Image (cartoon, rainbow, N blue to C red):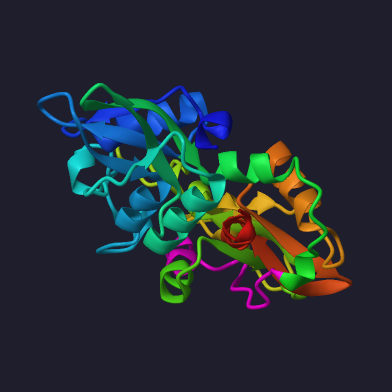
Amino acid sequence: MIKQCMTTQVYAVSADEPISRARNLMLKHDIGRLIVIGEENNPVGIVTKKDITKRLSQAEPTWRRRPIDNIPVSLVMTENLLNIHQEATAAQAAEIMLENEISGLPVIKKDNDDEKLVGIITKHDLIRHYSTKEYITKVKDVMDTYVVTVNIHHTIDHALYEMNENNVNVVVVLTEGNKPAGVISRDNLAFTELTDADGNVYGREVKMARRDVAAGMKKYRYIREMPLVAEDVMTPLNKTITSNERVVDAAKVMSTIGTKSLIVIDDEIVGILHADNILNEIKKQT
């Protein structure tokens, strides 16, 4: 039942507070979503890392814009809050999350004639619970074989474009030799500091070699800062799995390192295992 694997600590933010407040709470407590509270101190929505990165990808390129930290949570949150009863099953929670493309549900219980918020159930909670089982399903039977990639020199905006265009939360970053170097997730981008305290855009200083005279010694000068690129924000690829491993073992890895996806490599990249792939397996269990 949900009450056996849910998280009882629920963090909240007011609808009129800035995104910076939501982001800081997520960073402090290592969570990916917050319940949004309205004027009457009642839940009116939920804000996630995905909501923040979707806002980042709008309008002009991210690296040219001022910070979004002054934008109120109400403008990026998801309304029409869904919830689930604490006596529901993990399979039911997985089904609701998949059907509604969400990653967490407030958990309620009946308190006389009222409903009381008692916790939250997330994909991470469900995957951790699944990892304790002994199912024999292999990764190759559930993984996605379509992997979206970007080059290490692609801009952050290009990575965001690929995520949105392909409806994925993760892209694999490849070297010039098409070898996997790391991954970029929406989580990476939601919490990447793109500007300093004064609103100036971070970038990388690029040096250009020049000679004052023909065949003379090279001298270097700084040219203008360039926008951050994929290799600046990616998470290095330090853990992968093979297609012949059990899904429950992959779930253990996900739970341990706190990731929502794992690259599947059999000599070369053959797929990617997402949290949703595991939720589809959970949904089948009764």
Image spot of residue 234 (x, y percent): 61, 53
Residue 279 horizontal side relative to residue 36, left or right? right
Query: Quadrant of the rendered structure where residue 220 is?
Result: bottom right
Query: Does residue 4 show up magenta in the picture?
Result: no
Between 135 and 47, the one nearer to me in the picture: 135
Image spot of residue 51 (x, y percent): 34, 51
Whether residue 97 appears in this view of the structure is yes
Q: How many marks?
A: 0
Between 270 and 89, the one nearer to me in the picture: 89
Residue 146 horizontal side relative to residue 132, left or right? left
Q: Tell me where the magenta segment starts and ends, as one range.
A: 142-160
Q: Residue at x 68, y 62 (%)?
A: 273
> Eyeballing the image, is 92 above or below 5?
below
Whether residue 152 appears in this view of the structure is no
Residue 229 horizontal side relative to residue 215, left or right? left
Question: Which residue, as the protein is rendered here, is positioned at the far left?
Answer: 39
Q: Residue at x 47, y 44 (%)?
A: 192
Residue 58 horizontal side relative to residue 150, left or right? left
Query: Does residue 147 show up magenta in the picture?
Result: yes
> Eyeballing the image, is 239 above or below 179?
above
Between 122 and 134, the one nearer to me in the picture: 134
Query: Quadrant of the rendered structure where residue 47 is?
Result: top left
Q: Residue at x 79, y 56 (%)?
A: 240
> Which quadrant: the N terminus?
top right
